[in-house]
Amino acid sequence: MSHSSSNDISRVESMGDKKSDHEQSADPSMLKTGDQVKAGDSKKSKEEKKEEFRPALPPEPLATWRKVLKDVWIGESKNIKVELCETILTNIFIVSNNLFEDILLLHKICPDYSTQKMSTLAGFVMQYFAQWLNKCDRSELYERYLTRQLQMEALETAVVKHTTHLRTIADIYKLKVKEMMTPACNAVKRLLELKNYRDAINCAAVFDLQEEIPIEQIVVPCLLQNGYLAIEAYLKDRRDLQIELVRFFDNFVGMDNAKMRERVRCLHESGLLPMSQMKMQSKTLEKLVAKLISIYGLRGDEAAPNLARCRQEGSLRYVVSKHFIEGTMSEESYTDYVSHALKDDQHLQHYFVKHLYRIGEIDDAVRWVVHCKMNTNIPHSVRAIMDQTRIQSAEEKISRLRERRKDMVDVNLFDGHPVIMVDTIMSLRRLIGVFETASIIGIDTEWKPMFLSTVEQVALLQVSTRSCSYLVDVIKLEEEIGEEEWMEFFKALFCTESSMKLGFDFANDMRVLRASFPFLESMQPDMKNVICIMKLATSLISENSASLDLPVDEAHGSASNENTADELPSDEQQLHFKLADLYYRLLGERLDKREQIGNWAVRPLRREQMKYAAMDAYCLIRIYDRMKVRATEEFGMNWQTHLEMSDVIQVKPKQPKKGKKKATRVDDNELQQMMERVNAAVDESTANGQRPSDVKVIVDSMMFGLGKHLRRCGIDTILAETRDSLVECAKRERERYILTSGKAYNELLRNRALCASNRILCVPAVQTMNAIEQIEYVLKYFHIKLHKEDI
């Protein structure tokens, strides 16, 4: 301990008998009032005014205590200051004449009293006081010092600036008693009037006032201000309130913006909602409801029926697009999916048949009317076109498809490689024995369709060895076996040293497996030799891009970008490939993906489904073998090093935290140099150059920075606030190109309104290109020639 610090403690001890009789009535936070300001104050200097309105100094010995603690807290290292402050506070506790009042005042006059952090001097004073009280006889101290007036002052002190230390103060000053509930409730209401929802919800949680205030008045606005942590404590173990919150937001799901605004206005005018508008798009609301369901572990169909309905309708629209527009979903797979979704749901039957009619698939609309035996629920537009010929044709098609569906006993992926269903506890135990001798295992999963569950859940687990593929029927086995048997199975699969386990995007598969089998979270550290093929391929390419020979168009994820491949350096190209891409490049064969979007919850599985599921796991073994040959024999790479980089369970060293990325500015000099490069590229190209005014674009919301720079270059650019507004604009202005990036590109390609369009450009993300390179990429793509007057 330093000499100065010892002197400070001595000064504290010596101040014990210097307290004046009137100091307890002083308010150390009080400012001088406006009545004290004289008429001539406007002529005073700035320093004189600051001095006049400076907060009054606290009385002694509080002023000395504050100074000593402040000097130590600011001037010493973390470990030393904690030890010294504990010693100083202990001495203060001993010499104080009114302990509870003095510590409350000391807390208020700490220089960081207003700071909303636990690790402040003000917070330390209260936390150490609580610890000290726990070590001594509190009853005598409470009888001697604690009064109702002091409790009221403590409550006010704990909420007037923020509520970070409220729980500690409530414990010290015994605020959670019946007599203090009304003042606490009034404090919450004052915070709500100030629209300080986060502190209001903290205060209500401390005093268990959940029953006193409607969630629309406190939880909803706090959630819209991103106060998730505060809400988590408020709703903990309150399933009734959790469901009520989910249902509140679910009531808005499916509404258009106009209806949503009107409903919020009505709630506001009736006094049920403190805000007059709720700036949320329909997709954002759906994600919020889904997130709340996941956090609280609620059943989606019970807590959020509107979200479940929207998901069901969306999934049906999606399979219609896959089957009729893209042609990537087989007739049998489409039929399985839809028939299971429409079963016993008259609302969904009516919606789906009407949707088919609206998009021109009239015969299929009639087919589903017949299949579902719809009588009174048929849309008027469909009823009008139903005749005997169409009905008979629909019946024949239904009969033909039913004949094709048979329970397949003997299914082979190819000659000598059987596909075996594992749907009993005995067959599951036999499969565990297979793992003991297998040297390499391919693993994949198929999920339940979203209309059956608002969260992703495993329906089928595929496990392939070199000689056989096994389809583990999770849906059927869930009815027969418990967690103990599942743990034994997964331990044998994942936790053995003897076998190499392969998955394509293994992190994604593990995420869904953990949702169905939560115990896998604790098992994960014990998993061994679990290799992600996607990470392995990326690792090989990072060392030598020729090792896998993925073409440029696949690296960009779009054939529409092919004409830019020669104009960009290879290190600027963004790697993006799917399992089918990799399999084709390495083995020269196409994977049949027509069963991919099928309903994997229907039993029995069709022969085509079984073969598709088995191939997704078995192809990983073939890919692995071919990559190993290319890497070691053709390119001389260190295979073991790349395997270690691709082990999904391997503990990675902690990376230092990166600071916040500053916004990139493009100065005139950089712009001039870029303009010269672009013009040179256009002059060398065989294509005719365009002027900036010849090109119109709409930019996705994630790329506003790029959009503003393109405007600077003279290009007609619209910045789309939301995905819906982007699509609507693109439909209205068909000459306008769409600029997007990453997953959004694939989502826009799937959009039925844009799927036949060649106007969507995938721009490499900011992680691979800086701002000036993105601008250059777009200008080269459109062969734009810039002049100084364009900028």
Image (cartoon, helix red, strand yellow):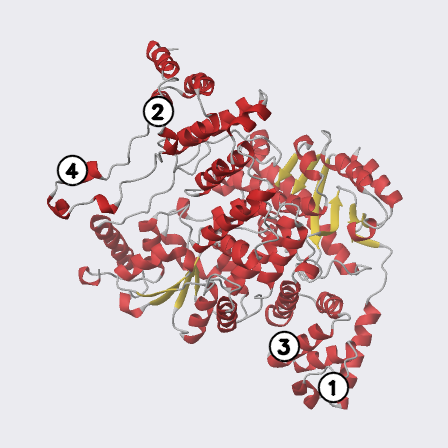
* Three-letter code, disc 1: Arg
Q: Earlier in the sequence, mark 4 or mark 3?
A: 4
Separation (CA) of disc 3 from disc 1:
18 Å
Q: Secondary structure at mark 2?
A: loop
Separation (CA) of disc 2 from disc 1:
101 Å
Q: In front here: 284 or 756?
A: 284
Q: Is residue 421 above or below residue 651?
A: below
| Residue 534 in view (yes/no) | no
Residue labelled with disc 4? 48
Residue labelled with disc 3? 355
Give the position of the N terminus as an image quadrant: top left
Q: Secondary structure at mark 4?
A: helix
Separation (CA) of disc 2 from disc 4:
29 Å
Q: Give percent across and percent down for residue 48.
A: 15, 37
Q: Quadrant of residue 596?
A: bottom right
Q: Give percent across and percent down for residue 137.
A: 59, 21
Q: Residues within 10 Å of mark 1 (few under 14, many from 20)?
A: some
The answer to whether 666 appears left or right of 73 in the picture is: left
Residue at 72% across / 67% down in the picture? 341
Badge 2 vs badge 4, beta-carbon distance below 8 Å? no
* Three-letter code, disc 2: Ser
Q: Is residue 76 above or below residue 479?
A: above
